[in-house]
Amino acid sequence: MESRRKATVGRPRGFDADAALEQAMRVFWRQGYEGASLTDLTEAMGISRTSMYAAFGNKEDLFRKALDRYSEGPASYAGRALREPTARRVATAFLVGSTLATTMPGCPAGCLGVQGALAAGEAGSHARGALADWRNEGVALLRDRFRRAVEEGDLPRDADPEALARYLMTVANGIAVQASGGTPRSDLQLVADMALLNWPPDTRP
Amino acid sequence: MESRRKATVGRPRGFDADAALEQAMRVFWRQGYEGASLTDLTEAMGISRTSMYAAFGNKEDLFRKALDRYSEGPASYAGRALREPTARRVATAFLVGSTLATTMPGCPAGCLGVQGALAAGEAGSHARGALADWRNEGVALLRDRFRRAVEEGDLPRDADPEALARYLMTVANGIAVQASGGTPRSDLQLVADMALLNWPPDTRP
DNA sequence: TTTTTTACGTACCGATCGATACAGAATGAG
DNA sequence: CTCATTCTGTATCGATCGGTACGTAAAAAA
């Protein structure tokens, strides 16, 4: 098989695949996997069903790609938080970031990784599993970061990195649920502040 | 019009409406409003479509009644928590109760009030709104309880009942999301404990 | 008994679901 | 040019969606 396939052959695509995926992501974000019909999706993307299937596979594939785009876009605060220098600053950046991201004017309220498919019938079971994995990967990344923080000494040696990570993700998920229901950003900032009150103090500047 | 209508006239109902509603509640709990089809529901309820429509109205009505039953059943821990004698005990009972209720063996993982319709298309918008209202009513009940606690002196006078209530509901919602994804009960108990570490201490026994 | 009222089972409604067959259109390769 | 390849729009597929018409069964009322 020819491993490299040039895209220069055949009729060129008549739409911007990135922009179309962005719109699909927003529909899934607002309506969830099962609540987003192919008609909703393709109308927002500005393309026909045939073009969508040719470019993205099927609805499940489109959802996965939309989730990837969500990770690199609206949820990119998580990666930035992980690169903060101390555990406390990681925790603060993570919760502040989730508060801001779930209450962005002009974007659907809440988090695609939470409301995209929390519960679903048979048709949405793959999406549901993908999002559970997505959240658990976030916990794992936070846990590894906090393990490093213990080694580096900015968390107490008896701290539980796994529990701290699970705690942060749980609060962030709750913030997403509240945001989805219309709770204003200012209220959620108070919640995030409260959740960080008991965080172990930095032992380094 | 005759204001009181006796149920003794006509062919008696051939099924237990309470038991049927219980099964419907569990289907909505596991699959969400949009993910639960009439076929899923009526098969679990053990009745035909016609009987369901005659007894419960339509899918939206059935969902509302299932939500009421959920409040009085799996979510009854909330009412009991509100009757605890001090604010701290209210908060503890609320989070412990939500941890237990969202990880009950033999029941769907998570909370119907969260995953029943967090995001939805046009068809599920009513259910989505009903659940947002349901969560906000919980916040209001907690807030009123904490206002009383301030008056009664078991919360500091500068405590913010609204923020404390929102905080508790947010953590409980996050616990529900995590439970829905399969996080074990023991992990969530740690989360609930951590969330209560910074709670204002009781000033009364 | 007959009549009235309510519940039930079957069979079906139009609409919408995700997904495709097909033919025409637009490009590079030869 | 012709041919192969890829994209696009139309028109549709079978399945399923929520919801119902209709005739029958089972009870109380007359």
Image (spheres, coloured by chain):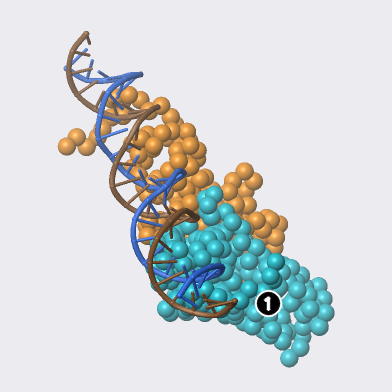
Chain colours: A cyan, B orange, C brown, D blue
Left or right relative to B205: residue B8: left
* Above or below: residue A69 compared with residue B48: below
Q: Image height check: is A16 above or below A113? A: below
> Visible in this render: residue B1?
yes
What is the x, y in percent for residue B184?
A: 69, 56
Q: Nearer the viewer, residue D5 or C14?
A: D5
Q: Which residue is located at x 35 percent, y 39 percent? A: B53
Most foreground residue, A57 or A157: A57
Q: In the displayed orientation, state which residue is furthest to the bottom.
A: A205
In depth, the one of B170 and A3 nearer the eye is A3
Q: Position of residue B193 (x, y in %)?
A: 67, 64
Labels in figure, total: 1
Q: Tell me where residue B105 appears, x and y as whole percent.
A: 64, 46
* Amino acid beneath label 1: Trp
Residue B149 visible = no
Q: In which quarter of the image is the N terminus of chain A?
A: bottom right
Which of the 4 image quarters holds residue B18?
top left
Residue at the spot x=60%, y=80% of the render? Answer: A77
On screen, residue A105 versus residue A157, left or right, reads left
Q: Reply above or below: A78 against B50.
A: below
**Mark 1 surroundings: few (<14), some (14-19) or many (≥20) residues within 10 A:** some
* Label 1 SS: loop
Taking A187 as reference, is A127 above or below it? above
Q: Which residue is drawn at 72% across and 78% down?
A: A200
Chain letter for the residue marked with disc 1 in the picture: A
Question: Residue B41 appears at what percent x and percent y?
Answer: 46, 42
| Identity of the residue drawn at 67% across and 65% down | A136
Q: Which residue position holds label 1?
A: A199
- What is the quadrant of the C terminus of chain A in the image? bottom right
